[in-house]
Image (tube, helix red, strand yellow):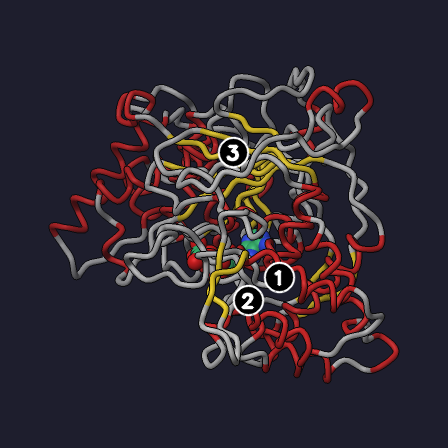
Amino acid sequence: PRREEVSSSLCPLRDLRTLQQCDTKLGELTFSLTHTVLVDVAAFNKGKMLLAQEGRDMWHSNFVKMPCSPSSFMVKSGMMKSPSQVKRWEVICKQLKALASKTEVDVERVQEAILKYNPKYKTEWSFDALSSFVQSIPKPENYSCSLFPKIAALALDLPKHVKKGIPLLRSGQTAAVTLSQLQIACLLANAFFCTFPHRNTSKPNSEYHGYPSINFTSLFGKWSQRSKEKLRAVMHYFKVVTETKPKGLVTFQRQCLKDVDRPDWKSCAASMPKLHVTSGGSIEAEGTGLLQVDFAACQIGGGVLGSGLLQEEILFLMNPELIVARLFTEKLADNESLIITGSQKFSCYSGFRDSFEWAGPHYDTLKRDNWARLERQIVAIDALHFKHRSEQYNMSKINRELNKAFCGFKGQGHETPDIATGKWGCGAFNGDPELKALIQLMAAGKARRGLAFFTFRDETLKRNLEQIYTLLVKREITVGQLYELLENYCAILRAQPGDHVDLFKFIENTLGPSRSLL
Ligand code: AR6
């Protein structure tokens, strides 16, 4: 009986509000100074037609420098002639057309093509992983060599599909970009063939220093079990989008929490939000329809094009359209988040890290909103990375995490879905799951949104979180009061560094155990 009473303040998953249940009052598709739409808005509103919005090339520091820009040049040295400047896109076209005209090409040809317009990297770039991948897949299910020409053809269509400049989502700005899934596929096909100019180095003084990498070269180099499974997911995506043109739109919105909007946490009178806790399931499956938290790196997508294979990288591999965010999203600052609406899930997986495996296709059955976006919303928030666990029990760090989570959770004026999250910042980033759970509860409380918390098989955390939440609710603790409890907790840890008490224990000791409530 006690157990039942303890869980009584928790809510079942079905009581949380999904995107499908929200009246978002979208209206017609519109663009604005801070929302760039890369499809023709009039044609879309008339008949849901997805045509590229006319525009001009923007070889400019506020825009993505495009591979097909007439301003993109490279030096070509001929055997007999002295070096001369040529339009880079002409070289790219020549190479990709040669690939696209074949029914099958091998990895050596792909490599040769890529290096023709990236000659500087001839000795640096390896294609070991890509060729081992192709060799490792048994013949009947090995479609790679016939897929390369199709990816090349898709990449070549860039000037046809993307005519308007793609603005960079820069730090300090709240701004959004909406593109069609076909435009994304075409951009990713270009990333696959490493055509994006000025994006191959991240040296401190380089132009795109504050941006994640986008050309796929780092995925092709070092062979490992991880790279094999990653390439399976990526190739599957290209197989699907080259067979059937995807039909919707996706919006990427950078949200910046201005100083004036920063909550005064200590005086916040909001109560605890609705909470569902489960040790089974995952954010991306059972959390479908909720705002799904991406346990992000400040460089969006983290190590997805390298060797990383944690929650964020797996999410990006299952929904590869998310990878395009790397093209235009500057590193997230402490007060920023990125919200992605409408991305499609193409694959399923099993395992995590080294046990990760691509587990086959996923067929999305989600409905689309008025803007033809699949009803899936993901928010990228990057937690702090603590080298030493003790660093996190510090109010300036806690404030940073509260504001970061709030920046991801705060709505945009209309009805919003509740949130699916879990041990944000508690794996690679070494956070304390108890502290991070409370921080997320507080941010959700302030944003007036419920939480579904997936502990990812952590039974102890599930039990303890249920218990502490019940205590907080029964004692009618507000977000501000919980903030004060955290202040006291940090003060005690500072005063008695050797004497670590768990956070939940400390709260129970302070408020009196939930048992006394029953
Ligand atoms: N659903 C719910 N919980 C999950 C899931 C899932 N699908 N996957 C993992 N977990 P981690 P971080 C749990 O380490 O500490 C990436 O490289 C699981 O218990 O991915 O914020 C990013 O790019 C796991 O231990 O998040 C960043 O660089 C815990 O969530 C960095 O990792 C934390 O997952 C972020 O690290």
**Does the CB distance between marks 2 and 1 fall below 8 Å?**
yes
For residue 13, say whether it is visible: no
Secondary structure beneath disc 3? strand
Count residues near mark 1 (Cα–Cα under 10 Å), then give few for <14, some for 14-19, many for 20+.
many
Instruction: Report x, y in % for residue 392.
Output: 27, 51
Disc with the residue nearer the chain's start (2 vs 3): 2
Count residues near mark 2 (Cα–Cα under 10 Å), then give few for <14, some for 14-19, many for 20+.
many
Q: Which mark is residue 117?
A: 2
Label 1 CB less than 8 angstroms from ligand 1 = no
Numbered marks: total: 3
Q: Please tell me which residue is depicted at 57% across the width and 17% down the height of the picture.
A: 414
- Residue type at mark 3? Gln
The one of 240 and 1 positioned closer to us in this rendering: 240
Marks 1 and 3, how far apart at CA: 31 Å
Numbered disc in front, either 1 or 3: 1
**Does the CB distance between marks 1 and 3 fall below 8 Å?**
no
Instruction: Report x, y in % for residue 368.
Output: 76, 31
Count residues near mark 3 (Cα–Cα under 10 Å), then give few for <14, some for 14-19, many for 20+.
many
Q: Which mark is residue 253?
A: 3
Secondary structure beneath disc 2? loop
Q: Is residue 94 above or below residue 167?
A: below
Disc with the residue nearer the chain's start (2 vs 1): 1
Q: Is residue 504 above or below residue 101?
A: above
Q: Is residue 368 above or below residue 77?
A: above
Q: Please tell me which residue is depicted at 37% across the width and 61% down the height of the picture.
A: 202
In the image as oriented, which residue stretches furthest toward the front? Answer: 81
Q: Is residue 118 above or below residue 375?
A: below
Displayed quadrant of residue 16? top right
Instruction: Report x, y in % for residue 200.
Output: 45, 63
Numbered disc in front, either 2 or 3: 2
Instruction: Report x, y in % for residue 221.
Output: 54, 77
Identify residue for label 1: 92
